[in-house]
Amino acid sequence: MSSNSTLPHPQVDPLVVQEIYSSQLAQVLNEYATCVALTYEALLTFHRQVELVWSKKGSFGSILYLLALYTTLFFIIILLIFQFGTGPLWCISYSLMSRGLQLITTFSRICNFLADLGNILGIISFTAIHGLLILRVYAISGGNKPIVSFLVLALAARGALVVATIPESQCTSSVGGLAVKEVQDLEQNTQLILAGVDLTQNTLAAVIDATSVLVTLYYARNSPERALLGIPTITDLLLKHGILRFLIIFTWELKLAIGTKLIPSHFANLDSVLQLCISTILVCRFVLDLRGLNDWYGGTSDLEGSRQFSLFKAVGQRIHEDVLNDFALTSHLTSANDVIDSVQPGQNQGDPWSISTLPQV
């Protein structure tokens, strides 16, 4: 009996096969588009990265920025390689196996390695992006510990769910690679559980994004400098404070959460990689804009009296000041007295304490 006669031939619905093929093809096209977009963004802003990020690569914000941008890029590249490995490479291995070369196991190991690496990079990428949002919340709220603690717990819970639901083996050593029958079995056995987990993960991400919007809106309109600098305009809130960017990220996360219940399983998270790419671009651009404004104002705060602190307190104070310098739009104005001191008296006739030349925030 020939070797081909012993090969399993699972009976599956051709419509299911076509649906899976269509979703995989759309996923590959999405990943190619996101890879090109993120690569272009990294090259386009590289000169600003050198000036504003690499020059301060020791700060916590710079580390998260580099992790967010480049880990996301590597993550998408790994996804593309993984898609290629579970497609054309499996066809090649099947063809070679019919000639007596047993390469299925080797390709299965490579595939599982790529899957594990992609999972790790995906967790780091998401954590870094939302870590930047949390640092922004920390800075604009003046270090509000209850709010930041809540966001950190939500981020940790989301990461724990992702880790807990990673399968032990994401590739098969059976003939034909990711067999359609195995895909069907996986859907039948775990679709309800994974749908609930996906919903929870996306909901936690949406909670972090929504909190970032609300906290930014509240503190931007109720900051101590408001009496001197005036209430920020809608344009300032949407653009300068990043609320428009946060709203886009929140809306997309909310769509992903709702989609797990309303959209067919093959297409529910079809745009999740694209959402990650756009979120990375929006957040990283916002960080660059913040640093550019702070450098243009020329305001950085120094750690005064750090010798009075213990080692750990001094480190904590340094991190606190670094976060404020990087993520607070008016970090150079550390108090109302600084605002008053920065005003030049007699600038306008009839108004000896005009603040018309101060930047509106």
Image: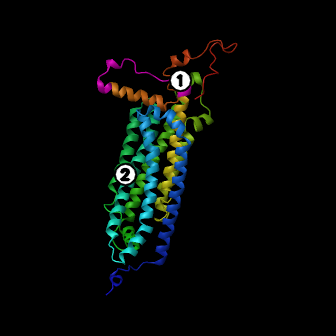
Q: Which mark is residue 47?
A: none
Answer whether labels 2 and 1 touch (C-beta < 8 Å): no
| Most foreground residue, 44 or 132 | 44
Q: Label 2 sits on what residue type?
A: Ile
User: What is the quadrant of residue 177 in the picture?
Assistant: bottom left
Query: How much space separates mark 2 and mark 1, taking CA atoms?
Result: 38 Å
The coloring applied to the image is rainbow
Q: Which mark is residue 298?
A: 1
Residue 302 included in the magenta stretch of the image: yes
Q: Residues within 10 Å of mark 1 (few under 14, many from 20)?
A: few
Q: Quadrant of the C terminus?
A: top right
- Left-right relation of 48 to 124: right
Pick whichever of labels 2 and 1 is earlier in the sequence: 2
The percent coordinates of residue 157 (x first, y second) are 36, 47
Q: How many marks?
A: 2
Q: Label 1 sits on what residue type?
A: Gly
Secondary element type, mark 1: loop
Secondary element type, mark 2: helix
Residue at 35% from the left image edge and 63% from the top image edge? 170
The residue indicated by pointer 2 is 120
Residue at 62% from the left image edge and 12% from the top image edge? 345
Stretch of the chain drawn in magenta: 295-313
